[in-house]
Amino acid sequence: MPDVLSEKAPLMDVEKDSDHRQEPTDVSSLLPTKDLHAENTLTRYWGKLQAVQRSRAGFQTGLFRVISSILIILGLIILFTKPWQEVRGERLFRESALAKTPPDIHSMRYSKSRTYPVCSSIVSKNFRYEFNIPTHDSIPKEWRLIDTAVYNKHVKGQVVIARGDFFQESDIEVHVSVRSSKDIDFDNSVKFSPTHISLRLDYRFETSSNDCVVIDVVVYLRPYPKIHSRILQVHTNNLDIRFQESLNWEVDNLIVNSAHGDLVLDANLWVEPLVAHNVSFSTIYGTIFGIFVPYANLKVHSDHGMVDLWLMPHLLRDRPFYPENVSISTISADIWVQGFFEGWALHPYTHRIDVATHLGNIHAAVPHGLYTNVSSIFGDIWTVIQPFGASGPDIVNEIYTRTEFGSIRQLWLFEPQNETRYEKEPVKYNSIFNLVAHHEAKNGTMDMQYPHSWCGHMEARINDGEIFFDARSHDNDIKKGDGYVKLNRTHKGSKCSSQVDVHMNTGSMKIEFAG
């Protein structure tokens, strides 16, 4: 008996030759039959077709169920293996009033992806080196990239610290590319000196105004197994330095400096971040941008280039997070410090923060520990300060804001965050009850706002100008006179020992209390 496919051909032939045939009364008479009592072939055909369709539908349903089961299993794996605090930290970050989107280097005032004039390379040469972090205790667990070449304005390029390949054989793999628009003698002009813990670069080119030399260095850090290094240092006079995200290394001391290059620290705070406990970023003429987590000590300094950074907490909650010292400074450039207060775990902090410049303006949102100083000599200040709870009822903390020849355009002290977040119990003590603060602007304007819960003694003085003092929403002991206002505020059941001094020579002063 022909199979299903062969049964269809006779039927089509019959239909084609039906012009000279009487109209059949029974379609079954035109179809091949097995015998008089055989099943109608067309019926069998449709039955088989329906069976195939049912089989396909069953297969699709089964496939859908299998895929659904796999997705459910994967979802459960992600739910129970990914740290819940990591998920919550990302959610908090995205929903924060201070940070609607994750920090992005390109959304900062660093509007350029560092590019250089295209060199019509006449000559080029590539170099490759491999290093391993020593595992023996007698050998320092460190690695340094030191560029000792003198500054040459015709030499451009960058050092990129990148995540290595999963199958990378060495801990550190360095690729160096040198391209020049003029013929150079590499043997005499380029000197690279590797040791087991360092790579020294030295290059000396005789260049003119039309010459172009580009040096690109890529340092690949092997992500697995995770490396813990005592020192990781990158130094150059000519080149930019950029750290990419998700390096999955832990470094006790990260030292980065460039005389004329920009410094960029990119970071993914949720996926295998670089954990650097003590960080120093410095440049003379370059700018500094990045996402910095002050695990212990953080120092960022630029003489004449702008500093623009995010000061972030450690979001993964896989280790204790207690910053110690944060110093951010310039001589003649502006400072921008952006904060994400919602990501900070609510426990008492004891760190010190110092944000200072000689000639630049300061825009800073900073988390307050035991000591915060925001100061400029000739620039203006905009600052938001977020305190946290105290570890005891008598812990004194200090805040200082000062500008010699500028104005304090905005000084907002927020309410301490005392509710429970990532902690078993809320912090019991209000840190601003023992606050010692001094705010001073010699000339110009001062606009400051203190939180509703603040209590203690405040004295504001101005030598030549007016004071607008708004504390109408509370019952206060206020004394006003010519050029001064004194306030004593108490809260029932609270020990209020705060001492706040506000002073100006000439200008106008405005003091308000939130709520």
Image (cartoon, rainbow, N blue to C red):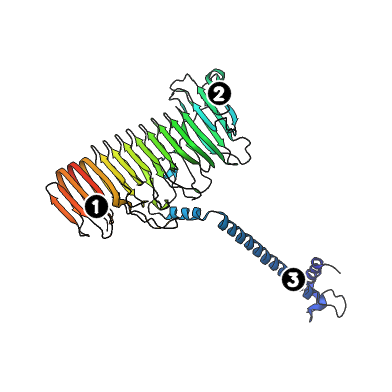
Residue assigned mark 2 = 193
Quadrant of the image containing the C terminus: bottom left
At label 2, the amino acid type is: Ser
Q: Are marks 1 and 3 in contact (CB under 8 Å)?
A: no
Give the CA separation, mark 1 to mark 3.
86 Å
* Residue 456: assigned label: 1
Q: Residue at x 38, y 34 (%)?
A: 301
Who is closer to the viewer here, 13 or 46? 46
Between the residue at mark 1 and the residue at mark 2, the CA separation in whole angstroms equals: 63 Å
Side (left or right) of 82 relative to 434: right
Amino acid tagged 3: Ala
Q: Indicate which label's residue lies in the foreground, 2 or 3.
A: 2
- CA distance for labels 2 and 3: 75 Å
Residue 222 in picture, x, y percent from top left: 58, 38
Query: Residue 372: where, in percent of width, then height?
Result: 33, 43
Give residue 133's position: percent from left, percent from top.
58, 33
Point out the frontmost of discs 1 and 2.
1
Badge 3 local density, few (<14 within 10 Å), some, or many (20+)? Answer: few
Q: Amino acid at mark 1?
A: Gly
Q: Secondary structure at mark 1?
A: strand
Rendered image: mark on residue 62? none
Mark found first going from the N terminus, 1 or 2: 2
Label 2 Cα crowd, 10 Å radius (few <14 / some 14-19 / many 20+): few
Q: Nearer the viewer, residue 419 or 376?
A: 419
In-image side of 425 versus 14 (left or right): left
Q: Residue at x 85, y 78 (%)?
A: 38
Residue under numbered circle 3: 51
